[in-house]
Image (cartoon, rainbow, N blue to C red):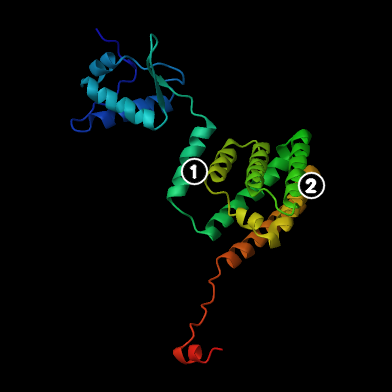
Amino acid sequence: MAKEIFPRSPFMPVQSGRASEDIALNLEAAILDGRLKPGGRLPSERDMQVQFGTGRGVVREAIKILKQKGLLEVRKGVKGGAYVRQLEMANVSESLALFLKQHPVEPEKLIEFRESMDRTITVLAISRGTRDEKEALLAAVLRFEALMRKPDPDLTAASELDRELNLMLARMARSPLFEWVMHALQMGFSSHDYALYENPAYREQAAANWRDTARAIAEQEPMRALSCIGQHYGMLRTCVAEQNKPVPAVPFPSGTDAGNSP
């Protein structure tokens, strides 16, 4: 006789025509409410067939759905089967990053969101970050500034370092939600900061602003740090506006003008 998966909390019955979706929802609910623990193995396909009163193909389709969601992993071998995955920050951030890439956000809305988030993260980082973390952030920012001062800086390396600086700051806030969102933004499209770094007119100013922000954080001065953040996003808005400004059309010479050309 097949053993019930959850004798105290039986699954909802599945409906014909959408059985695999119903099984997947039942299993997902069990994972999210803790009845199925990370690292735990699901019952065999045969046991689930009996539990749900359906065929093996339907059970396999349900497992496939949950595997695509990142909730299950299928292992082979003697101890093979479907196991509950431990969701990591990278998994969540990657999904959010993909979503953001598929749903473009206009620059001003993204800048507005990043500015408000950075303000909150910075205040939390000042109050919760350790002295070593703040000194490490400042040291990394000084390396970034030195890179930006070069006549022909490596913008790929600069972009990677800027991404790591933002993640360092988010980790100092001791808030997993802010860290997840920041990680997703950095994986997805950052906040158009690349416009500042690609433009020689703004490059050194942006790097100096990062330096001033990190120093204010290290010196426990939230108001000065928030002022630096305001300056950064003001500069970014100006840079993006200039970048998106339409190029004036060049009048095409008329036949008469062309004929009078030397």
Q: Which mark is residue 97?
A: 1
Q: Where is the C terminus found, in terms of image quarters?
A: bottom right
Lower position in the chain sequence, tag 1 or tag 2: 1
Give the x, y percent position of residue 108.
55, 60
In the depicted structure, whether residue 163 falls above or below residue 200: above
| Residue appearing at x 53%, y 58% in the figure | 109
| Residue appearing at x 55%, y 66% in the figure | 244
Left/right placement of residue 164 relative to residue 15 reads right
Callout 2: SS: helix
Give the x, y percent position of residue 257.
50, 90
Q: Amino acid at mark 2?
A: Arg
Quarter where residue 40 is shown: top left
Give the x, y percent position of residue 47.
28, 14
Q: Which mark is residue 215?
A: 2
In the rendered structure, are the residues bearing label 1 and label 2 in contact, judged by CB atoms less than 8 Å apart? Answer: no
Query: Few, some or many C-alpha atoms within 10 Å of disc 2 (few <14, some 14-19, many ≥20)?
Result: many
Quarter where residue 14 is shown: top left
Q: Which mark is residue 23?
A: none
Left/right placement of residue 41 relative to residue 115 reads left
Q: Nearer the viewer, mark 1 or mark 2?
A: 1
* Of residues 252 and 147, the one drawn nearer to the viewer in this rendering: 252
